[in-house]
Amino acid sequence: MEPQVIDRPEKSRYEILAGDDGTETAGFAEYHLSEGEIAFIHTEIDPRFGGQGLGGLLARGALDDARARGLHVLPYCPFIRGWIGKHPEYADLVPEARRARFGL
């Protein structure tokens, strides 16, 4: 099965599901949601799933969802911040006045 990114608002995190049956939580991106903003604070991929590109899929899925919801992104998490840096088409999600603070 293809990995799937899902929002778990009750846990304040996006999860990426993978594995043979597509039901194992392979990683997550924790966030804090406030009015009109989503602050990503920590991203983690289970070492058993390392090297499969799941971190990038998780970042893309979470950021695509933030865009669809009209949320501004605050990438406090170094992984999410670095991913945005490598994919400048996502930099517009970070408020322009705050991009320098994140090195974007």
Image: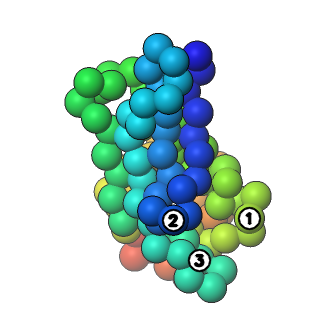
Q: CA distance from mark 1 to mark 3?
A: 10 Å
Q: Quadrant of residue 93?
A: bottom right
Task: Determine crowd level at label 3: few under 14, some 14-19, many 20+ residues with C-alpha closer than 10 A.
Answer: some
Q: Is residue 62 above or below residue 101?
A: above
Residue pictured at 43% horizontal, 30% vertical: 24
Q: Amino acid at mark 1?
A: Arg
- On the image, the x and y values in percent for residue 100 come to 44, 73
For the question of whether residue 104 can be seen, the reply is: no
Q: Amino acid at mark 3?
A: Glu
Residue pictured at 51% horizontal, 65% vertical: 10
Task: Determine crowd level at label 1: few under 14, some 14-19, many 20+ residues with C-alpha closer than 10 A.
Answer: few
Q: Secondary structure at mark 1?
A: loop
Q: Secondary structure at mark 2?
A: helix
Residue 23 left/right relative to 46: right
Q: Amino acid at mark 2?
A: Glu
Near-viewer residue (54 or 19): 19
Near-viewer residue (12 or 102): 12
Badge number at residue 10: 2
| Residue at the disc numbered 1 | 69
- On the image, the x and y values in percent for residue 34 come to 56, 82
- Among the two numbered marks 2 and 1 on one chain, the one whose residue lies closer to the N terminus: 2
Residue pictured at 57% horizontal, 40% vertical: 5
- On the image, the x and y values in percent for residue 89 come to 64, 49
